[in-house]
Image (tube, rainbow, N blue to C red):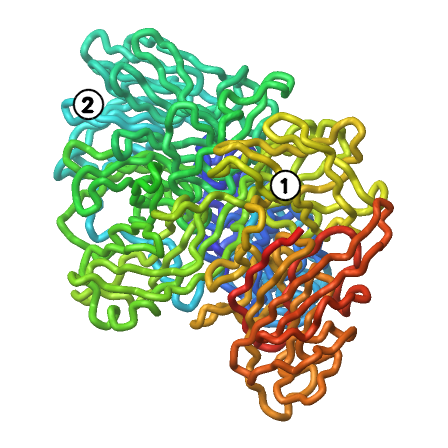
Amino acid sequence: MSQRPYHRLGRHAAGLALTAAAAVIAAGVTPAAAQNAQNTQSAQSAQGARTAAADVPPQEPGVTLRVFDVQVPLKQLCELKAGQTPNVDKLMPAIDWTSDADFGMSSNFMTEVLANLTVPQDGTYAFRLISDDGSRLTIGEREVIDHDGLHGAEPKDGTVELAAGLHPLRIEHFEAGGGQQITLQWKPPGAADFTLVPTSALSTDADVVRVTAPGRKECVGGQDSPGDGLPLADVHPNYTLTDLRPAGFEPKVSAMDWLPDGRLALTTWGESQRSDGELYLLDNVIGDTSPQQVTVKKVASGLKEPMGVKYVGGKLYVSEKHQLTELTDRDGDDVTDERKKIASWPYGGNFHEFAFGLLYDKGSFYLNLSVAINYGGATTDPQPAEGGRGTTIKVDKATGKVSYLAGGLRTPNGIGWGPDKGLFVTDNQGGWLPSSKLLHIKQDRFFNHYTRYGDGSRSGPFDDQPVTRPVLWLPQNEIANSPSTPLMLKKGPFAGQMLFGDVTYGGLQRAFLEKVGGEYQGAVFRHSQGLEAGVNRISVGPDGALYAGGLGADGNWGQEGKLRFGLQKLTPNGTNAFDIHSVRATTKGFVLKYTQPLSKETADKLAQSYEVRQWRYSPTPDYGGPKIDEEPLTVSRAVLSDDGRQVRLEIPGLKSDRVVHIRSPRPFAAESGETLWSTEAWYTLNTIPGKKTPVTVYEAEEAALSGGAGVNKDHTGYSGGGFVDRYGTPGATTTFRVDVPKKGAYDVGLRYSNGPDPFRGDKRISLYVNGSKVRQTVLPPTENWDTWATRTERLTLRAGANTIAYRHDDGDDGHVNLDMLHLDRPGERITLFDGGSLSQWQHTDGRAVQWPRTDEGSIEVCCGDIRTKQSFGDHRLHVEFRIPKLPDDVTGQDRGNSGVYLQNRYEIQILDSYGVQALADNEAAAVYQQKAADTNASTAPETWQSYDIVFRAARYDSAGQLTEKARVTVVWNGVTVHDDVALNGPTGGGIAEGPATGPVRLQDHGNKVRYRNIWIEPLN
């Protein structure tokens, strides 16, 4: 199944139905690009072909191919979770695809093919679907071929009666690896043989821009249900829903505010790049009402895409794209008689340059200016305006003076007051935004979206400021896609918390915020769905009800299956549904508060009732971004409060600067028997209370880049969202901003690759600290561009903020790639794994570690070797391991085999050698196939053992020639079994020797060996 129903309200089922503007912001941005996308007709079923051209949007030959990266091997077609943006979305000709280039990836993906099929005459049509792996063909509403399951490129046939004309066609497909194919052939009436369905018989919606997003996409799981792994489907039980639109009133709501007499002022968008926005006054909307009682009066028209309205001092003010406009009624009939420009701001005419929202306080208005973007979603570079886009601004009502408060925003389609009368803004996924987020605006803050102006030499007004972390990350496709107005609740069970709407994810989400370390962070929850349209604006009315204004456009911009306009209200009805009230961070975990006491059945298995994962994001110039270092965590302890309403969780391995996802799958019930309304919380753990956890890792792609340096992903094994390249250009610079608690010496390690182009050998770049050149640093070769090493240098840093820059100066070689920066105090032990996070490690292909955790706080070998991200020279290493007990008939190298690789070159063998009298050079503690352990210090299987290793790296001269062999000392369970032994080159499976440092690698040899308590001390 697709993530979208085949037939859907108000949409054309077979194609994207996105206009060139609308698709740009399909991932949750604005209504800007939805021009001419409304009122398309939904597809008819196969029982009746669409023959009238007016029934479908403009078409072009070909089909729409969407690919979703599920990252797990499927065995059959899966139903994708709703609201997920595809990884690949492109126009293709006839359906005959067999290569990675066709699909955009090689394995572990779901495919959706959408088209209109034109048949020339009535009759029986035979189809042949050839696929590798499973597939399904549907024409109209009829399943024609079910070819599901794991198999090679095999054909399967089916027939269907079709009338002449146009029929929606859809193919679902999955690929689990080992080749891929989708081919669709047909045999029309009277034809002798099957032939490829020609491109001339296939069409899809024309002139669309196809929005994609990176990262893993998810299938619906066996325990998933609305509010528990899936979006909610209904209105929250605490509210009663009331429709407010009189017959024929179909507003695409762009702003709302209240008049003192209880009337609602409402603006409509008016479509992209047009001045067709309108202002209405609605009466009889508060209290007990109905659509029949509501009256609507248009009081202004010709507005340029208004996105904010505010009633101040007897007049209405509107934020249009280019200016703040005062509307005056001179004769008392409510209709605008006079318009006056109060202020204007930089505006370059781009379709995406909006002025979002409008607040007022103490003589000033507040609103957001979005940046210009290209069709496709990339930030326009340079910006067409003269400056100042992507900002929150303050406008003096009396003088019209515009002041800039903060910057680094992209599509801030929401502004509202929050706790302590703070100013809060939602921003939408895009360039420099791997996911949407909620931000706390303060003077001079910068939120990470970079812009350039003029000839490209002028930066945005706040781009030189340190990046301020979001209050909340809003994980894309899970809890938000295009968040809109944030609003703080002042009454009810969630008083003091914030709500925000969402245009494409739809409904309302709820945010609990707390201050930790002087800054806001907190959790976000699903709150309510069941509305008629995606939510662009929300407001609390005089009657205490929540008013929701809807907006959307055809294609995949707007909430799936909903109207493109809407106005409804949610009135609190006194119900207290069983829900998560709040999540507070503690030093060791979280405290979850519930609205009702938990049941005894739930309390009896509390720790086992929670599933926890954490990850981080790495902002890059790319549109969106994947989760980085995603890993599961285990709840070690769960304690229920005496009143049964609070659960204190202890979760080893929590790290700051992470999003923590906490889920308590149903059945999770209250004492009343009611099950949990929404089972999930996403907590943005910027800071762990009571812990000083300075940042020690900095990603190069998040640093300030200049002089031609850029971000790329065309080599494997990088640590975050990409790496920095283009260092062949003199002037290329990567500037890290690092913060340290104390002045002094720090070991600063640069993770880099130095491949063989344009020459093999040491390469030099210049190192700057706080603007001053320290030295020309030498980066030894890494043999190829997929191998990474760490160059560590001792630098003196001042307390607080510092800059560390790597620049290609005159006299440098350049031609290196930079991945990340590590900061450690000299001589300080580095914990690699202590039962908690595995963020220091990665699989050798760059994947986050997939080795499962055990109840005893260890990890178990699985799914490929893992290695440290950081590389080391001389070091002391401590590793504890546990070998499984295997049947006696399992012998030799199959008996508890694993290994510890030093510098990814030299293996110290792990094997069940308990009781062996004379150890060989391929048994436990051996330097693999070089030297056996001097003594068998092994203990029995299923007991914990340890290696304490002192390693001295090989030495090389300036010409890259080996001058001294690497040496190793190994203490096994307290017994020295190798004493300063010289190593005769790399062992089997190790990389070539060379002057570059290398990581620690743990081997997956197919046996369930476990590891714990791993640490390292650099000795150089």
The reply to whether residue 192 is visible in this rendering is no
Question: In the drawing, what numbered circle is on residue 259?
Answer: 2
Instruction: Answer with left or right where residue 907 lies relative to residue 292.
Output: right
Residue located beneath label 1 in the image: 794
Q: Nearer the viewer, residue 396 or 337?
A: 396
Residue positioned 84% across, 45% down in the render: 958
Q: Horizontal and vertical percent for residue 741? A: 47, 38
Residue positioned 24% across, 19% down in the render: 311
Q: Nearer the viewer, mark 1 or mark 2?
A: 1
Q: Toward which corner of the image does residue 543 lie, by quadrant?
A: top left
Q: Nearer the viewer, residue 786 or 693?
A: 693
Decide: few, some or many residues near mark 2? Use Cα within 10 Å; few <14, some 14-19, many ≥20: some
- Compared to residue 885, the image places residue 978 above or below, namely above
Question: In the drawing, what numbered circle is on residue 696?
Answer: none
For the image, the number of numbered tags is 2
Q: Secondary structure at mark 1?
A: strand
Residue positioned 24% across, 72% down in the render: 601
Upstream in sequence: badge 1 or badge 2: 2
Q: Nearer the viewer, residue 381 or 301?
A: 381
Decide: few, some or many residues near mark 1? Use Cα within 10 Å; few <14, some 14-19, many ≥20: some
Q: CA distance from mark 1 to mark 2?
A: 64 Å
- Compared to residue 812, the image places residue 87 above or below, namely below
Q: Horizontal and vertical percent for residue 471? A: 38, 39
Q: Toward which corner of the image does residue 888 lie, by quadrant?
A: bottom right
- Compared to residue 607, the image places residue 164 above or below, namely above
Q: Secondary structure at mark 2?
A: loop
At label 1, which amino acid type do we have? Arg
At label 2, which amino acid type do we have? Leu
Q: Are marks 1 and 2 in contact (CB under 8 Å)?
A: no
Instruction: Answer with left or right where residue 82 lies relative to residue 929.
Output: left
